[in-house]
Image (cartoon, rainbow, N blue to C red):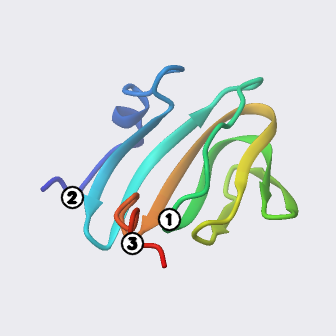
């Protein structure tokens, strides 16, 4: 299992067609990088797992539930499982480190 990564190598695997690249997956968490360019629409849906975003580059806003937050390099955002959320008003291209716990989609089908 790979234990060390560089964002540069992961960035090279991103594209408009594939804006998210998972680079780590273990049962208790997963991690990836998500990229949205100025003018893009964030089409993600609520996830079955808790999620943390760390903004590596860019400026935008994120709606989390009924709250709206400005985000830029260094911002950290927590999103509870099943909560509506999306980036919008992207002023500078975004690159965001994303952590899911447990790993993304691992709880799908296990909701009560």
**Residue on which disc 2 sits:** 3
**Residue on which disc 3 sits:** 110
Residue displayed at 36% across by 45% down = 22
Q: Secondary structure at mark 3?
A: loop
Rendered image: mark on residue 48: 1
Q: Is the Cβ of the residue at disc 3 closer than 8 Å to that at disc 1?
A: yes
Badge 3: few (under 14), some or many (20 or more) residues near its Cα, within 10 Å? few
Which one is closest to the eye, mark 3 or mark 1? 3
Residue displayed at 25% across by 69% down = 27
Give the Cα distance between marks 3 and 1: 9 Å
| Quarter the N terminus occupies | bottom left
| N-terminal-most mark, 2 or 1 | 2
Rendered image: mark on residue 10: none
**x then y, percent, for residue 98:** 50, 55
| N-terminal-most mark, 2 or 3 | 2
Residue displayed at 46% across by 73% down = 111
Badge 2: few (under 14), some or many (20 or more) residues near its Cα, within 10 Å? few
Badge 1: few (under 14), some or many (20 or more) residues near its Cα, within 10 Å? many
| N-terminal-most mark, 3 or 1 | 1
Q: Which of the pair 22/11 is nearer the observer? A: 22
């Amino acid at each position: 299992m790979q234990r060390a990564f560089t964002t540069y190598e992961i960035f090279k695997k991103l594209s408009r067609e594939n804006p998210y690249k998972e680079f780590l997956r273990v049962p208790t968490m997963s991690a990836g990088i998500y990229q949205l360019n100025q003018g893009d629409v964030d089409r993600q849906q609520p996830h079955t797992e808790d999620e943390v975003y760390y903004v590596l580059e860019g400026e935008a806003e994120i709606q989390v539930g009924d709250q709206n937050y400005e985000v830029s390099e260094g911002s950290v955002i927590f999103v509870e499982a099943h909560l509506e959320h999306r980036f919008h008003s992207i002023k500078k291209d975004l690159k965001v480190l994303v952590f899911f716990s447990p790993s993304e989609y691992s709880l799908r089908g296990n909701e009560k």
